[in-house]
Image (spheres, helix red, strand yellow):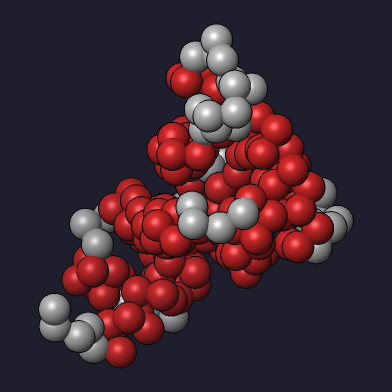
Amino acid sequence: MAKVDRRILKTQESLKKAVIELMAEKKFDDITIQDIAERANLNRGTIYLHYQDKFDLLDKLIESHLNELGEMNSWACEMEWNDALVPYFEFFEKNYLFYSTMLASKEAPSSFRARLLASFMEGFKGEIDRESGKNTGLMEDVMLQYAGTAYVGVIEWWIRNGMPYTAKDMAKQVGVLLGRSL
């Protein structure tokens, strides 16, 4: 795979940061390409070299965050809940502006929460305890919906409340709860 020019990556990061900052200030529908260009200190034409429009930019931004989470799923499933969740909460903490905008803002696309939930539910599929008997009689789709919704809800609560606990504390708490549920 060819290595992407650092200038292109820097431009794309600048555009992604600009759109998230603007979304924290006003409705996405009210944001113009000119607003994004000014915030990123770029020409309007530069945006169109990288993205079709502001919707494509936002979609690529969401996709990159969900892909990063998906990559974490591949190795986290080998760990105990408490240890596996620490990198996730650290990731949410590091990307606070993005997640606070996408989860806590009423102006963010509702599809983001649904995509995040679907991502976690997919990751939880292999985590259901089928051997101890604690889940006998429970339907997998109900368990996944319950655990996924709870997890997204706790992340949302944590972010909305200014992350009152450390990433490690949250991982420990949520790890115990998910361990009980799945």
Q: Which residue is more in the foreground, 121 or 17?
A: 121
Residue at position x 69%, y 47% in the image: 175
Q: Residue furthest right?
A: 164
Quick one: quadrant of the C terminus? top right
**Quadrant containing the N terminus in the rendered view:** bottom left
Would you place residue 145 above or below residue 10 in this image? above
Q: Residue furthest top?
A: 137
In the rendered structure, the answer to whether residue 172 lies left or right of residue 110 reads: right
Viewer-closest of 51 and 126: 126
Left or right of 52? Residue 111 is: right
The answer to whether residue 91 of the structure is visible from this angle is: yes
Instruction: Identify the residue shown where x is 70% and y is 33%.
Output: 180
Q: Position of residue 140 (x, y in %)?
A: 47, 20
What is the quadrant of residue 32 in the picture?
bottom left
- Specify the farthest residue to the bottom: 6
**Residue 181 sits in which quadrant?**
top right
Number of disc labels: 0
Q: Which residue is at the front of the view, 170 or 156?
A: 170
Q: Residue at x 44, y 39 (%)?
A: 126
Question: Which x, y percent locates residue 91?
Answer: 59, 64
Where in the figure is residue 61, as x and y percent of width and height? Answer: 39, 59
In the displayed structure image, the side of residue 153 where residue 173 appears, left or right: right
| Residue 141 in the image: above or below residue 86 | above
Is any atom of residue 104 visible in this view?
Answer: no
Residue found at the very far left of the displayed protein: 1
Estimate the x, y position of residue 26 in percent, counting from the top left.
Answer: 59, 50
Does 70 sit above or below residue 153?
below
Q: Nearer the viewer, residue 18 or 95?
A: 95
